[in-house]
Image (spheres, grey):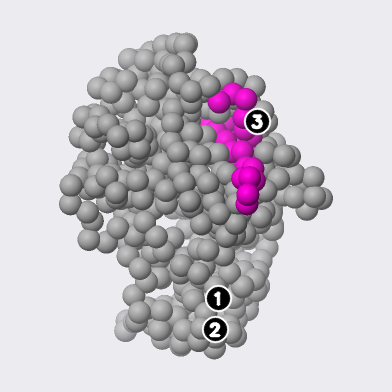
């Protein structure tokens, strides 16, 4: 659901690309391997082309990792079929292409074009689950009971064929009109069941809208959007699969998990103290996740509370293990063990974790090339996570600065999302007090100096908007 859009003039993101050292193209040997793999026949695999899969992604996406088909099981419950692009069939272990993907780690998205993990001949071509073409996939078949509990998991290499490339906006409109396509007609029901199960486990989701920069003719749009219900339901299918993958790897005592420590009790206690001053009702018998799920992020005080809750979500990492189980295998936000396996076109780790799951499920040895990769992946993914985050934030900061460059001195209405120091607004000694504010129009989030009341609306004056430094600064008016 798009909340606000503001047009920005022409912007050059080249300096940001150079600053982050993002590669401009693939080495000739890696590109050649990708082209040869794209032209090669699909390997032998189970034929599942009779299943009418569909993909659900942003409208402009062509690197389609996942396709799904949902159905009811005879006697009750549901069957989730989730086909994931089988990237390992296209990337030769020890080859130039594999080496280059390790250098990149993941796809980096910028408004003027992505920096892909794999060449476009694969990532937006032969390996992508585009409609009306046979594709190699790793097919997860997950059976759920009527309450959404997993009762069986089957994993296999398969040949699949997507019937349609759907997008979030269109799917949400179809859901609202009661006309969802048959393959995903059950998504609202299954998604709601899985969400409820997650909240009962203690899962935490931060429902803050995200900023994005999108092309608009000769210029750009700065967009603030929150996920619609169907996007949330879709994410639950990926979480379900990631938890199934984690269970397989933990049972086999080898794998790669996405971990995060559970929220510390003292941090939860501090958040609970902030609830009443911000007008957030937090009954004693409700979890953090349940409280957050009931908030309207468009309200300044609720948005401030959600921003404070982000402090609970710290320490995410990749944890590799082989033989000895991790001391802390769970992801605090999911409230369960969880692994990344559903985005191998865009994320390096998923290819290797998936290969481990396939081997364990089939009762065979994990391939040496996958086993050897596991201990090296956490550092590579952490490094490239930082690069990807810097690219996303840098693009937004640049767009904000360009958008506001000629409005220095103007006054805007803003909501106070965060303040320095404790919630009473006290700053550290010697530091000018301030915090973070979110403007209504344009949808900008930036630092503001002055004494700021958390969760309240204030007037702020723009003092700096420098595209060269990608810096925007306000002061309380």
Instruction: Please rate how many residues cluster around mark 1, counting C-alpha atoms within 10 Å: few if below 14, some from 14 to 19, many from 20.
Output: some
Label 3, label 1: how far apart the Cα atoms are: 38 Å
Q: Is residue 74 magenta?
A: yes
Give 171 or 63, whichever is nearer the viewer: 171
Residue at image point 35% right, 19% down: 30
The label on residue 52 is 3
- Secondary element at tag 1: helix
Q: Position of residue 202 (x, y in %)?
A: 46, 69
Label 1, label 2: how far apart the Cα atoms are: 6 Å
Residue at image point 46% right, 67% down: 201
Label 2, label 3: how far apart the Cα atoms are: 44 Å
Q: Position of residue 111 (x, y in %)?
A: 55, 40
Q: Position of residue 464 (x, y in %)?
A: 51, 63
Quick check: 53 left or right of 178? left
What range is drawn magenta here?
48-76
Q: Are marks 1 and 2 in contact (CB under 8 Å)?
A: yes
């Amino acid at each position: 659901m798009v909340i606000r859009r503001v047009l920005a003039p022409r912007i050059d993101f080249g300096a940001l690309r150079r600053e982050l050292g993002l590669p401009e193209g693939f080495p000739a040997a890696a590109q050649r391997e990708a082209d040869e793999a794209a032209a090669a026949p699909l390997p032998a695999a189970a034929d599942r082309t009779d299943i009418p899969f569909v993909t659900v992604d942003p409208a402009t996406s062509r690197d389609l990792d996942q396709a799904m088909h949902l159905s009811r099981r005879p006697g009750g419950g549901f069957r989730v079929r989730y086909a994931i692009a089988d990237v390992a069939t296209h990337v030769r272990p020890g080859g130039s292409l594999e080496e280059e993907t390790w250098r990149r780690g993941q796809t980096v998205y910028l408004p003027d074009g992505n920096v892909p993990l794999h060449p476009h001949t694969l990532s937006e071509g032969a390996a992508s689950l585009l409609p009306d073409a046979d594709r190699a996939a790793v097919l997860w078949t997950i059976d759920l009971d009527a309450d959404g509990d997993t009762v069986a998991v089957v994993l296999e290499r398969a040949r699949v064929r997507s019937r349609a490339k759907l997008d979030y906006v269109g799917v949400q409109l179809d859901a609202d009109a009661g006309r969802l396509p048959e393959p995903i007609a059950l998504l609202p029901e299954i998604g709601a069941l899985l969400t409820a199960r997650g909240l009962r486990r203690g899962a935490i989701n931060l429902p803050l809208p995200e900023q994005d920069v999108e092309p608009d003719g000769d210029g750009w749009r700065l967009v603030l959007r929150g996920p619609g219900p169907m996007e949330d339901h879709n994410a639950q299918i990926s979480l379900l699969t990631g938890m199934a993958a984690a269970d397989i790897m933990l049972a086999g005592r080898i794998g790669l998990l996405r971990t995060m420590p559970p929220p510390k009790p003292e941090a939860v206690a501090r958040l609970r103290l902030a609830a009443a001053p911000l007008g957030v009702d937090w009954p004693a018998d409700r979890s953090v996740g349940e409280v957050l799920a009931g908030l309207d992020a468009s309200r300044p005080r609720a948005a401030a509370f959600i921003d404070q809750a982000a402090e609970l979500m710290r320490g995410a990492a990749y944890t590799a293990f082989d033989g000895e189980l991790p001391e802390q295998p769970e992801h605090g936000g999911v409230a369960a063990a969880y692994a990344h396996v559903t985005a191998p076109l865009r994320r390096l780790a998923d290819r290797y974790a998936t290969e481990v799951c396939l081997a364990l499920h089939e009762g065979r040895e994990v391939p040496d090339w996958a086993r050897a990769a596991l201990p090296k992946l956490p550092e590579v993914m952490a490094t490239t996570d930082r690069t990807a985050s810097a690219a996303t934030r840098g693009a937004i900061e640049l767009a904000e600065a360009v958008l506001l460059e000629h409005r220095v001195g103007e006054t805007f209405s803003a909501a106070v999302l965060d303040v320095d120091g404790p919630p009473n607004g006290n700053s550290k000694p010697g530091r000018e007090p301030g915090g973070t504010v979110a403007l209504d129009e344009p949808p900008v989030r930036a630092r503001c100096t002055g004494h700021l009341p958390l969760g309240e609306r204030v007037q702020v004056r723009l003092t700096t908007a420098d595209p060269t430094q990608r810096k925007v600064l306000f002061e309380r008016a």
